[in-house]
């Protein structure tokens, strides 16, 4: 190959490597347009490990193992240009797989004590329900450092307009409930809770005029967690009964001796 060809190959390869790094960097941040699990923690590194163990265990039961056989592509009789093209394509595919095909991937939230596990599973709610059911059945804590785990069905930009749009898409899930609550938290952002609560509550009442507010023991709750520039949203059931989805407290609550006579 000529010097010109070598330089072009090196330049093209460097471009795709740079693009792959940028894609991985973006995939390592909490951004709009994903789903997964919002967790709180008192030791992040250990909590991520605990989250992976829990999520993989129950996702394997619900959806089957993530491990798949991958074919090996042979390079036989390729021209120089074809080989370069294939090498670039393989770099792109490797980058895309590393950032988008993992079933669970921890991403940075930029908020202390909060971690997010992005996911490709069909239903984060189904996975968390299975985890909580097992904790209640065994009456034992499944984590030490990982505290809360909320199934997040949508993320959006942290603007009131985008939050209302995303909330509107989730509200239909509340239709079978007689009571509801709004759980709104704002971290590291200038939005105010009241700016969100009023309009979202109006949307719920407009969609379901008979539904009642119950802050103590609601059947269903709409979660709005503002984390800097990205907001996480979810509709969950039995928020209070499930100790606000605190896995450690669920185990402690379940393990308490009954006081009934």
Image (cartoon, grey):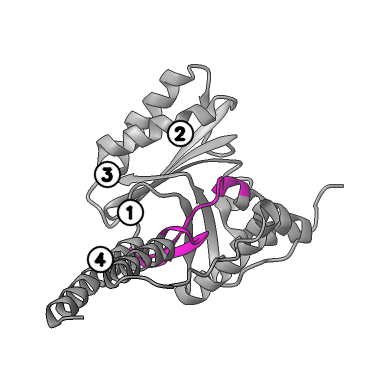
Q: Is residue 234 left or right of residue 29?
A: right
Of labels 2 and 3, the one closer to you? 2
Image quarter hosting the N terminus: bottom left
The residue most toward the top is: 209
Mark seen at residue 19: 4
Q: What stretch of residues is rendered in magenta? A: 100-126
Q: Which x, y percent locates residue 209?
A: 48, 17
Task: Examine the structure image and report whether residue 179 is included in the region drawn in magenta.
Answer: no
Q: Which residue is mark 3?
A: 192
Task: Examine the structure image and report whether residue 123 is included in the region drawn in magenta.
Answer: yes
Query: Which of the two discs, 2 and 4, labels the residue nearer the N terminus?
Result: 4
Query: Which of the two discs, 3 and 1, labels the residue nearer the N terminus?
Result: 1
Q: Is residue 119 left or right of residue 159?
A: right
Q: Label 2 to label 3, Cα distance in Å?
A: 21 Å
Q: Label 1 to label 2, Cα distance in Å?
A: 18 Å
- Residue at x-position 52% and y-position 22%: 211
Query: Which of the two discs, 4 and 3, labels the residue nearer the N terminus?
Result: 4
Q: Which residue is mark 1?
A: 31
Of labels 3 and 1, the one closer to you? 1
Mark seen at residue 170: 2
Q: Circle 1 — which element?
A: loop
Q: Label 3 to label 1, Cα distance in Å?
A: 20 Å
């Amino acid at each position: 190959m000529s010097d010109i060809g070598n330089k072009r190959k090196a330049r093209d390869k460097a471009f795709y490597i740079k693009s792959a790094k940028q894609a991985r960097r973006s995939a390592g941040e909490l951004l709009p347009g994903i789903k997964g699990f919002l967790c709180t923690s008192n030791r992040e590194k250990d909590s991520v490990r605990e989250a992976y163990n829990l999520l993989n265990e129950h996702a394997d039961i619900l959806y089957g193992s993530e491990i798949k056989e991958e074919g090996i592509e042979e390079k036989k009789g390729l021209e120089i240009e074809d080989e370069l093209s294939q090498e670039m394509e393989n770099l792109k595919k490797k980058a895309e797989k590393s950032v988008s095909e993992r079933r669970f991937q921890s991403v940075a939230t930029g908020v202390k004590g909060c971690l997010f596990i992005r996911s490709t599973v069909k239903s984060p709610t189904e996975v968390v329900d299975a985890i909580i059911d097992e904790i209640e059945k065994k009456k034992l804590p499944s984590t030490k450092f990982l505290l809360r785990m909320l199934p997040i069905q949508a993320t959006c930009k942290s603007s009131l307009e985008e939050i209302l749009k995303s909330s509107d898409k989730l509200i239909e899930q509340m239709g079978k409930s007689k009571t509801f609550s709004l759980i709104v938290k704002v971290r590291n952002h200038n939005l105010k809770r009241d700016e969100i609560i009023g309009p979202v509550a109006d949307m719920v009442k407009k969609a379901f005029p008979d539904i009642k507010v119950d802050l103590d023991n609601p059947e269903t709750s709409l979660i709005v967690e503002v984390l800097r520039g990205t907001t996480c949203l979810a509709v969950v059931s039995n928020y209070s009964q499930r100790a606000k989805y605190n896995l450690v407290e669920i185990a402690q609550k379940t393990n308490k001796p009954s006081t009934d006579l």
